[in-house]
Image (spheres, rainbow, N blue to C red):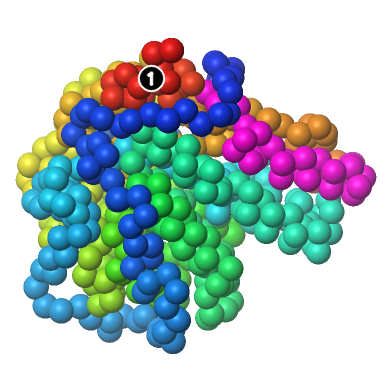
Amino acid sequence: MSLRLALVSVFALSAACSNSPTQVSVGGGHAGVAGTPAAGSAGHLENAGGAGAGGNAGGSGGAPLMPVSDAGPDDAAPDGPVLPAPTFVHAELDQLLDGKGQHLLFRTAAIGNWLLNEGYALELDGDSADRSRRIEARVSELIGATDAATFWKSYRDNYITEADFTRIAELGFNSVRIAMNARLLLPEGQDQFDETEFKRLSDAVDWGAKHGVYVIFDMHGAPGGQTGRNIDDDINDQPDLFTNKDNQDRLVKLWTEIARRFAQSPTVAGYDLLNEPLPEQFFSQYVPQLYPLYQRVGQAIRGVDANHLLIVEGANWANDWSSLGEPFDANMAYSFHKYWNASDISSIQDYLNYRKKWQRPLWCGEIGENDNGWYQANFKLLEDNDIGWSFWTWKKLDSGNNPYSVRPPDGWNAIQGYASNPGSKKPAASNALATLNGLLENIKLGNCDFNKDAVCSLTPVLSKQALCTQ
């Protein structure tokens, strides 16, 4: 999501409720329980503005892995369109269908701040703690590299667990969009994939299969960075995915490996190839590279995976679709993001026009960071126009406008102060470690505060749940 650090207002907790899961049926609308993967099915088998207008701002679970192959520019897929097997989510012209051929509308919980951190979601201010690598550097300065490595492993172990997937399904969401950081899966300066981090993706797919929740993988932080802003965890505020061909090769290699591992999983719904690439006001000179790169990545994926939906976003926080082109695959969708803009049809009309022209499904790949009245109007607008959505984001620190709020641990203000100004006096290492250990406890779902009003404002379908009418 784009420039949230500067633009997001944190709303007060609207309704802190019990964390005891409440069983709710999905029912109604276009999608429903029939539009989700069957529980227990096979496992791994931002911003305002319209389209063309600038806005502001592998294999089965237990199978041994095949040797990793390099993915380069000559990777090829079979000639002509490759249609998916009927057991997978797929596009049929401008409609999205589930594996049974029934109409599907994504109602997605976006999982940010798990594998890729943004400073604002932890209430960390300033450039020195605005992205994953800088937050990691501040933590290492505070408690040392060894304890920091232990902290981050525990953080990722705790932040999202099966309990989150259980609750996501109970609340009526039928999918998750997992924001990935390329350098966790394919560490910088290395050619081998990190199996610990890949297992997190496999676990998520297993949990999704068990609880009837589709998984959409989102390349939120590509090799080198695709935005040149904090959201992609780049090194130097440059979109080096577009300035260094080696980074594009690594992107192709990584997506090919993800697709190879999950090619036979009907729980995986699709691949969101790049999040919010190339904000216009900074890096429009690279936009002509974008759609050819999508085509190259898509071709490489099709060499190992004929089944899954390919999702492309426009330049300029996903919303400039003049940067895109005619569909290059029968099984693809186009995505825009919606933040802080109007709640009427004019805000999405350009995308509706493109859907009619290109005959592919639309998806609002991010929406959120607003108040409940805006949610009520905009989620209804999307569903009335047969557009699925992804609510950003599932958890944040001390927030009232998303499903769950993480309580700040004791001493967090000292961490905040140092992270925003590393030249200031550091809290004692023992104190910092105690605070960070407190955070590890607080991020567990059972210790978070549930924001009932935010969830119940999302769509008429969700608002009719027993949870919302009690």
Q: Image quarter for residue 363?
A: top left
Q: Is residue 204 left or right of residue 277?
A: right
Q: Residues within 10 Å of mark 1 (few under 14, many from 20)?
A: few
- 24 shown above or below 437: above
- Assign the N terminus to one quadrant of the image: top left
The foreground one among 141 and 399 is 399
Q: Is residue 54 among what the camera can see?
A: no
Magenta-drawn segment: 425-451
Q: Residue at x 30, y 50 (%)?
A: 38
Q: Residue at x 12, y 65 (%)?
A: 83
Q: Is residue 264 left or right of residue 410?
A: left
Callout 1: SS: helix
Q: Amino acid at mark 1?
A: Ala
The foreground one among 150 and 322 is 150
Q: Is residue 119 left or right of residue 257?
A: right
Q: Which residue is mark 1?
A: 466
Q: Is residue 75 magenta?
A: no
Q: Residue at x 42, y 70 (%)?
A: 61
- 296 shown above or below 215: below
SS majority, magenta: helix
Residue 318: % across, % down: 33, 45
